[in-house]
Image (tube, rainbow, N blue to C red):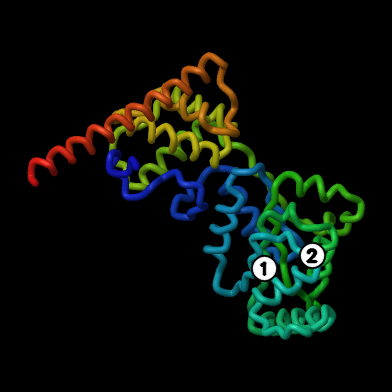
Amino acid sequence: MYQQHFGLDQLPFTLTPNTQFFFGLTPHVEALQVLQTAIENGEGFIKVTGEVGTGKTLICRKLLNELPDNYQCAYVPNPYLNPDELRWALATELGISLQDNINQQQLTGLIQNRLLELNRQGLKVILVLDEAQALPNKSLETLRLFTNLETESTKLIQVVLFGQPELDNRLQDSQLRQLKQRITFSYSLRPLLWDEIQAYVDYRLSIAGYRGKALFSDKDIKLISSAARGIPRLVNVIVNKALLLCFAEGGNKVLTKHCKAAIVDTEDAESLPTSVQNRGWLYILLIIGASLVMLWVTNADWLSTLRESI
């Protein structure tokens, strides 16, 4: 890979949400502030929505990492669960020992008792669900019933929903109007602006160990921003490919041709003009061909040296 070529300690544009690379971009900071305020308020549901790749899971992990010690968190990353499975998942996260033959009424009672026990210990319980748009309607209703559990002064559990815009559409269903009314705080993540993407790229490179001059020009960052529609995940994909192409040529600065070729090779990026796409594919093929030739020559030299030593 290109790590050694650019003097990096690690790859800066992987798709795994890594809080080490969290950058204080305006929409992400605002989302965290809404979450923290809502959690301190202690009431109802909290909802954060955003398009695929806008950073919801990263914000979720950042929130979980920064919760104070007096919070007990139950985290469900893949909530495509029916009501029974959702209760089991919550019970497991709360550390409840379960028997296989327990019925749902008994399970609900155990959950309530555990929540009361944690409340007496001075702990606040938060249930966090990622990809919440996948929850069936009956499971969403089960979540609402969970929030009915309370003492005279406080709720025993808060629910934080992270989801795609489809979650907002789901909540327009009249069957879910009671749950919708209980969403006391919500935030919608917007795409990044080009200058935010410029700062984002520079920050991730610096965290990864890069100490040289800027690798991308303003013009190319604007090109990447437009192609990625301001979505951080697509920015990561395009920038990673552009760095690979630059490395394959032995360059020290990413050029426009590298960015265009990376955009052409990225499935969900905004399309470039057809003529540019054709040149992009040709460029990628030439780079691959040149790399293969270099690899063959290197191996050939190595084999020749080996024969002479024998």
Amino acid type of the residue that numbered disc 2 sits on in the rendered structure? Asn
For disc 2, the marked residue is 82
In-image side of 34 versus 258 (left or right): right
For disc 1, the marked residue is 126
> What residue do we see at 78% from left, 56% from top?
183
Badge 1: few (under 14), some or many (20 or more) residues near its Cα, within 10 Å? many
> What residue do we see at 66% from left, 76% from top?
92
Badge 2: few (under 14), some or many (20 or more) residues near its Cα, within 10 Å? some
Q: CA distance from mark 1 to mark 2?
A: 20 Å
In this orientation, which residue lies closer to the viewer: 263 or 179? 263
Q: Position of residue 190 (x, y in %)?
A: 64, 39
In-image side of 38 versus 55 (left or right): right
Callout count: 2
Q: Position of residue 304 (x, y in %)?
A: 15, 37
In this orientation, which residue lies closer to the viewer: 206 or 137? 137
Q: Secondary structure at mark 2?
A: loop
Residue at the top extreme of this rendering: 275
> What residue do we see at 43% from left, 38% from top?
240
Compared to 272, does 232 lie above or below? below
Q: Earlier in the sequence, mark 1 or mark 2?
A: 2
